[in-house]
Image: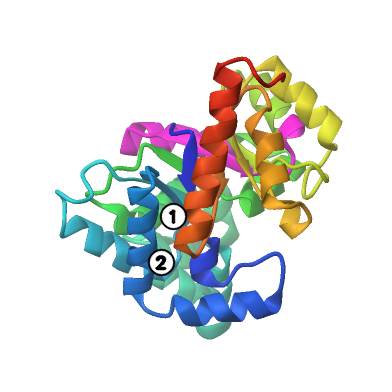
Amino acid sequence: MERIIFGDNQFFAVNHISDEKSRAQSIKFKDDSAIIKTLDIAIAAGVNTFMCTTHDRIANICEIIRKDPTKYKDFKIYPCMPYAHKYANAVTELGIAGTLKQYVPGNFVGSLLKGGVAYLSKDYISIMELLIDAEMKMFKGINTPVIFLQNVITDLLLGLGMTDFLLGFAKHVREKYNAEPGFITMNLPKLLDTLEKAEFKNPIICTSINKVNFRMSGGKDLYEKTLREGRCRVIAMQVLGGGAIPAGEALEYVSNLPNVESILFGASSRQNIENTVDTIRYHDQKRRTGLTSI
Protein backbone atom coordinates (compact mmCIF):
# COMPACT_ATOMS: atom_id res chain seq x y z
CA MET A 1 0.00 0.00 0.00
CA GLU A 2 1.10 3.57 -0.65
CA ARG A 3 2.25 5.64 2.32
CA ILE A 4 -0.30 8.40 1.62
CA ILE A 5 -3.92 7.73 0.62
CA PHE A 6 -6.51 10.31 -0.41
CA GLY A 7 -10.03 10.04 1.04
CA ASP A 8 -13.46 11.18 -0.09
CA ASN A 9 -15.19 12.76 2.95
CA GLN A 10 -14.88 16.27 1.58
CA PHE A 11 -16.64 15.31 -1.64
CA PHE A 12 -19.82 14.28 0.17
CA ALA A 13 -20.05 17.00 2.82
CA VAL A 14 -18.59 14.97 5.69
CA ASN A 15 -16.76 17.36 7.97
CA HIS A 16 -16.04 16.71 11.64
CA ILE A 17 -15.30 20.36 12.38
CA SER A 18 -18.39 22.33 11.39
CA ASP A 19 -21.72 22.17 9.59
CA GLU A 20 -20.78 25.39 7.80
CA LYS A 21 -17.78 23.75 6.19
CA SER A 22 -19.92 20.76 5.25
CA ARG A 23 -22.34 23.02 3.42
CA ALA A 24 -19.50 24.81 1.64
CA GLN A 25 -18.02 21.49 0.52
CA SER A 26 -21.41 20.31 -0.68
CA ILE A 27 -21.66 23.37 -2.93
CA LYS A 28 -18.06 23.15 -4.12
CA PHE A 29 -18.35 19.50 -5.17
CA LYS A 30 -21.86 19.52 -6.59
CA ASP A 31 -20.38 18.77 -10.04
CA ASP A 32 -18.32 15.67 -10.81
CA SER A 33 -15.75 17.81 -12.60
CA ALA A 34 -14.82 19.41 -9.27
CA ILE A 35 -14.14 15.97 -7.76
CA ILE A 36 -11.97 14.95 -10.71
CA LYS A 37 -10.06 18.23 -10.55
CA THR A 38 -9.25 17.62 -6.87
CA LEU A 39 -8.20 14.02 -7.55
CA ASP A 40 -5.89 15.31 -10.28
CA ILE A 41 -4.30 17.70 -7.79
CA ALA A 42 -3.68 14.80 -5.41
CA ILE A 43 -2.17 12.73 -8.23
CA ALA A 44 0.10 15.63 -9.20
CA ALA A 45 1.26 15.74 -5.57
CA GLY A 46 2.22 12.06 -5.85
CA VAL A 47 -0.83 10.41 -4.29
CA ASN A 48 -2.14 7.67 -6.58
CA THR A 49 -4.54 5.83 -4.27
CA PHE A 50 -8.10 7.00 -3.62
CA MET A 51 -10.08 5.40 -0.79
CA CYS A 52 -13.81 5.98 -1.19
CA THR A 53 -17.26 4.82 -0.26
CA THR A 54 -19.66 3.30 -2.78
CA HIS A 55 -21.65 6.54 -2.96
CA ASP A 56 -23.71 6.66 -6.17
CA ARG A 57 -21.62 9.55 -7.54
CA ILE A 58 -18.46 7.46 -7.39
CA ALA A 59 -19.86 5.51 -10.35
CA ASN A 60 -19.60 8.70 -12.41
CA ILE A 61 -15.99 9.22 -11.28
CA CYS A 62 -15.10 5.66 -12.25
CA GLU A 63 -16.60 6.21 -15.69
CA ILE A 64 -14.44 9.30 -16.23
CA ILE A 65 -11.34 7.35 -15.14
CA ARG A 66 -12.17 4.42 -17.45
CA LYS A 67 -12.41 6.79 -20.42
CA ASP A 68 -8.82 8.01 -19.90
CA PRO A 69 -6.75 4.89 -19.16
CA THR A 70 -3.47 6.54 -20.11
CA LYS A 71 -3.86 9.42 -17.69
CA TYR A 72 -4.99 7.14 -14.84
CA LYS A 73 -2.85 4.08 -15.58
CA ASP A 74 -1.20 4.15 -12.13
CA PHE A 75 -4.33 5.18 -10.26
CA LYS A 76 -5.86 2.81 -7.69
CA ILE A 77 -9.14 2.89 -5.80
CA TYR A 78 -9.84 1.23 -2.46
CA PRO A 79 -13.64 0.77 -2.35
CA CYS A 80 -15.27 0.87 1.11
CA MET A 81 -18.64 -0.81 1.45
CA PRO A 82 -21.48 -0.62 2.15
CA TYR A 83 -22.39 3.05 1.91
CA ALA A 84 -24.97 2.86 4.69
CA HIS A 85 -26.75 6.14 3.89
CA LYS A 86 -27.52 4.90 0.39
CA TYR A 87 -29.41 1.89 1.71
CA ALA A 88 -31.08 3.81 4.53
CA ASN A 89 -32.41 6.36 2.04
CA ALA A 90 -33.55 3.60 -0.31
CA VAL A 91 -35.46 1.81 2.45
CA THR A 92 -37.20 5.09 3.32
CA GLU A 93 -38.19 5.67 -0.31
CA LEU A 94 -38.75 2.12 -1.59
CA GLY A 95 -39.26 -0.08 1.44
CA ILE A 96 -37.20 -3.17 2.23
CA ALA A 97 -38.47 -5.26 -0.69
CA GLY A 98 -38.00 -2.40 -3.14
CA THR A 99 -34.46 -1.78 -1.91
CA LEU A 100 -33.56 -5.45 -2.38
CA LYS A 101 -34.96 -5.42 -5.90
CA GLN A 102 -32.96 -2.32 -6.76
CA TYR A 103 -29.59 -3.35 -5.36
CA VAL A 104 -29.46 -7.17 -5.30
CA PRO A 105 -29.04 -8.93 -8.66
CA GLY A 106 -30.37 -12.25 -9.92
CA ASN A 107 -33.22 -14.41 -8.67
CA PHE A 108 -32.32 -13.91 -5.03
CA VAL A 109 -35.14 -11.47 -4.26
CA GLY A 110 -37.86 -13.83 -5.44
CA SER A 111 -36.45 -16.66 -3.36
CA LEU A 112 -36.16 -14.39 -0.34
CA LEU A 113 -39.74 -13.18 -0.59
CA LYS A 114 -40.96 -16.77 -0.82
CA GLY A 115 -38.71 -18.20 1.89
CA GLY A 116 -38.56 -15.23 4.27
CA VAL A 117 -36.47 -15.53 7.41
CA ALA A 118 -35.80 -19.22 6.82
CA TYR A 119 -34.09 -18.47 3.53
CA LEU A 120 -32.22 -15.54 5.03
CA SER A 121 -30.78 -17.62 7.87
CA LYS A 122 -29.98 -20.51 5.56
CA ASP A 123 -27.70 -18.68 3.17
CA TYR A 124 -26.59 -15.42 4.74
CA ILE A 125 -23.03 -15.68 3.38
CA SER A 126 -24.37 -15.93 -0.19
CA ILE A 127 -26.55 -12.88 0.43
CA MET A 128 -23.50 -10.95 1.57
CA GLU A 129 -21.59 -12.02 -1.53
CA LEU A 130 -24.41 -10.76 -3.77
CA LEU A 131 -24.37 -7.40 -2.01
CA ILE A 132 -20.58 -7.14 -2.45
CA ASP A 133 -20.98 -7.90 -6.15
CA ALA A 134 -23.68 -5.24 -6.48
CA GLU A 135 -21.41 -2.65 -4.83
CA MET A 136 -18.41 -3.60 -6.97
CA LYS A 137 -20.17 -3.16 -10.32
CA MET A 138 -19.24 0.52 -10.51
CA PHE A 139 -15.52 -0.32 -10.25
CA LYS A 140 -15.37 -2.63 -13.26
CA GLY A 141 -12.10 -2.06 -15.11
CA ILE A 142 -10.61 -0.05 -12.22
CA ASN A 143 -7.57 -1.24 -10.26
CA THR A 144 -8.98 -2.11 -6.81
CA PRO A 145 -6.21 -4.03 -4.98
CA VAL A 146 -7.82 -3.63 -1.53
CA ILE A 147 -11.55 -3.70 -0.77
CA PHE A 148 -12.76 -2.54 2.64
CA LEU A 149 -15.69 -3.35 4.87
CA GLN A 150 -17.00 -0.12 6.41
CA ASN A 151 -16.76 0.35 10.18
CA VAL A 152 -20.54 0.57 10.60
CA ILE A 153 -20.70 -3.12 9.58
CA THR A 154 -17.30 -4.28 10.84
CA ASP A 155 -17.95 -3.05 14.37
CA LEU A 156 -21.55 -4.29 14.38
CA LEU A 157 -20.39 -7.80 13.43
CA LEU A 158 -17.56 -7.53 15.93
CA GLY A 159 -19.95 -6.62 18.73
CA LEU A 160 -22.34 -9.44 17.81
CA GLY A 161 -19.53 -11.97 17.65
CA MET A 162 -20.34 -12.79 14.01
CA THR A 163 -16.78 -13.54 12.91
CA ASP A 164 -18.02 -15.80 10.09
CA PHE A 165 -19.30 -12.72 8.27
CA LEU A 166 -15.89 -11.03 8.49
CA LEU A 167 -14.17 -14.15 7.20
CA GLY A 168 -16.80 -14.60 4.49
CA PHE A 169 -16.23 -11.05 3.28
CA ALA A 170 -12.47 -11.67 3.13
CA LYS A 171 -12.86 -14.97 1.27
CA HIS A 172 -15.16 -13.52 -1.38
CA VAL A 173 -12.99 -10.46 -1.98
CA ARG A 174 -9.93 -12.65 -2.48
CA GLU A 175 -11.57 -15.24 -4.70
CA LYS A 176 -13.89 -13.09 -6.82
CA TYR A 177 -11.83 -9.89 -7.16
CA ASN A 178 -8.26 -11.07 -6.59
CA ALA A 179 -7.96 -8.30 -4.01
CA GLU A 180 -6.94 -8.07 -0.39
CA PRO A 181 -9.71 -7.59 2.16
CA GLY A 182 -9.50 -4.65 4.52
CA PHE A 183 -11.52 -3.70 7.58
CA ILE A 184 -12.37 -0.25 8.90
CA THR A 185 -12.96 -0.10 12.64
CA MET A 186 -13.14 2.13 15.68
CA ASN A 187 -11.75 -0.70 17.82
CA LEU A 188 -8.38 -1.82 16.48
CA PRO A 189 -7.32 -3.99 19.47
CA LYS A 190 -10.57 -5.99 19.64
CA LEU A 191 -10.84 -6.49 15.88
CA LEU A 192 -7.24 -7.65 15.62
CA ASP A 193 -7.63 -10.09 18.52
CA THR A 194 -10.84 -11.46 16.98
CA LEU A 195 -9.31 -11.98 13.54
CA GLU A 196 -6.20 -13.63 14.94
CA LYS A 197 -8.31 -16.07 16.98
CA ALA A 198 -9.93 -17.04 13.67
CA GLU A 199 -6.46 -17.67 12.17
CA PHE A 200 -6.58 -14.49 10.06
CA LYS A 201 -3.01 -13.20 10.26
CA ASN A 202 -1.59 -9.77 9.38
CA PRO A 203 -4.88 -8.17 8.28
CA ILE A 204 -5.21 -4.74 6.69
CA ILE A 205 -7.02 -2.50 9.18
CA CYS A 206 -7.98 1.15 8.74
CA THR A 207 -8.63 2.80 12.08
CA SER A 208 -8.73 6.15 13.89
CA ILE A 209 -5.30 7.06 15.23
CA ASN A 210 -4.70 10.44 16.84
CA LYS A 211 -3.39 12.12 19.99
CA VAL A 212 -6.78 12.79 21.60
CA ASN A 213 -8.45 9.35 21.58
CA PHE A 214 -10.99 10.47 18.97
CA ARG A 215 -13.01 7.36 18.05
CA MET A 216 -10.33 5.04 19.47
CA SER A 217 -12.04 2.36 21.56
CA GLY A 218 -9.57 1.19 24.17
CA GLY A 219 -7.58 4.41 24.17
CA LYS A 220 -4.35 5.77 22.75
CA ASP A 221 -2.01 3.76 25.01
CA LEU A 222 -3.51 0.44 23.92
CA TYR A 223 -3.38 1.49 20.28
CA GLU A 224 0.29 2.45 20.57
CA LYS A 225 1.05 -0.90 22.22
CA THR A 226 -0.77 -2.74 19.43
CA LEU A 227 1.17 -0.80 16.79
CA ARG A 228 4.51 -1.61 18.42
CA GLU A 229 3.68 -5.31 18.18
CA GLY A 230 3.42 -5.10 14.37
CA ARG A 231 0.67 -7.69 14.05
CA CYS A 232 -1.28 -5.98 11.24
CA ARG A 233 -0.98 -3.55 8.35
CA VAL A 234 -2.48 -0.29 9.57
CA ILE A 235 -3.96 2.67 7.72
CA ALA A 236 -4.36 5.64 10.07
CA MET A 237 -7.48 7.75 9.55
CA GLN A 238 -9.06 10.70 11.41
CA VAL A 239 -5.56 11.77 12.39
CA LEU A 240 -6.72 15.33 13.14
CA GLY A 241 -8.97 14.03 15.90
CA GLY A 242 -12.10 15.57 14.39
CA GLY A 243 -10.36 18.94 14.12
CA ALA A 244 -9.11 19.02 17.71
CA ILE A 245 -5.42 18.85 16.77
CA PRO A 246 -3.48 21.32 14.58
CA ALA A 247 -2.52 19.64 11.32
CA GLY A 248 1.25 19.93 11.81
CA GLU A 249 1.14 18.44 15.30
CA ALA A 250 -1.26 15.68 14.25
CA LEU A 251 0.81 14.63 11.25
CA GLU A 252 4.05 14.66 13.24
CA TYR A 253 2.50 12.31 15.80
CA VAL A 254 1.07 9.77 13.36
CA SER A 255 4.07 9.88 11.00
CA ASN A 256 6.38 8.82 13.83
CA LEU A 257 4.31 5.91 15.09
CA PRO A 258 5.75 2.45 14.38
CA ASN A 259 4.07 0.10 11.91
CA VAL A 260 1.60 2.61 10.47
CA GLU A 261 1.84 1.61 6.83
CA SER A 262 -0.40 4.33 5.36
CA ILE A 263 -1.97 7.64 6.33
CA LEU A 264 -5.42 8.52 4.98
CA PHE A 265 -6.47 12.15 4.65
CA GLY A 266 -9.04 14.26 2.88
CA ALA A 267 -8.72 17.84 1.68
CA SER A 268 -10.52 20.10 -0.75
CA SER A 269 -7.88 22.65 -1.73
CA ARG A 270 -4.57 22.44 -3.56
CA GLN A 271 -2.76 24.10 -0.66
CA ASN A 272 -4.06 21.67 1.96
CA ILE A 273 -3.35 18.64 -0.21
CA GLU A 274 0.20 19.71 -1.00
CA ASN A 275 0.93 20.80 2.58
CA THR A 276 -0.29 17.49 3.99
CA VAL A 277 1.74 15.42 1.55
CA ASP A 278 4.87 17.53 2.12
CA THR A 279 4.51 17.34 5.91
CA ILE A 280 4.19 13.54 5.95
CA ARG A 281 7.18 13.20 3.64
CA TYR A 282 9.20 15.58 5.79
CA HIS A 283 8.64 13.52 8.93
CA ASP A 284 9.25 10.26 7.04
CA GLN A 285 12.58 11.61 5.84
CA LYS A 286 13.54 12.63 9.39
CA ARG A 287 12.80 9.11 10.58
CA ARG A 288 14.88 7.55 7.82
CA THR A 289 17.85 9.72 8.67
CA GLY A 290 17.50 8.96 12.38
CA LEU A 291 16.66 12.50 13.45
CA THR A 292 13.38 11.52 15.09
CA SER A 293 12.93 8.95 17.81
CA ILE A 294 9.92 6.66 17.70
Give the magenta range.
165-190
Circles 2 and 1 in contact, beta carbons < 8 Å: yes
For badge 1, the amino acid type reads Leu
Disc 2, SS: helix
Instruction: Tell me which numbered mark, 2 or 1, is placed earlier along the sequence.
Output: 2
Distance between the Cα atoms at labels 2 and 1? 7 Å
Left or right of residue 240, residue 61 in this image: left
153 horizontally vs 115: left or right:
right
Q: Closer to the camera, 141 or 289?
A: 289
Residue 112: percent from the left, percent from the top? Answer: 47, 62
Residue receiving disc 2: 103
The vertical placement of 282 against 193, above or below, is below
Please rate how many residues cluster around mark 1, counting C-alpha atoms within 10 Å: few if below 14, some from 14 to 19, many from 20: some
- 51 inside magenta stretch: no
Residue at the spot x=40%, y=66% of the render?
103
**Residue 248, position in %: x, y?**
67, 46
**Main secondary structure along the magenta-highlighted residues:** helix
Image location (x, y in percent) of residue 118: 57, 54
In the picture, the disc for residue 11 is none
| Residue topped by disc 1 | 131
- 74 left or right of 57 in image: left
Nearer the observer, 3 or 225? 3
Please identify the quarter of the rendering in which residue 41 is found. bottom left
Instruction: List x then y, in percent, for residue 4.
Output: 48, 40
Question: Is residue 87 among what the camera can see?
Answer: yes
Q: Nearer the viewer, residue 242 or 202?
A: 242
Res. 177 image quadrant: top left
185 within the magenta span: yes
Graded by Cα atoms within 10 Å as few (under 14), some (14 to 19) or many (20 or more), the crowding at tag 2 reads some
Q: Residue at x 49, y 82 (%)?
A: 27
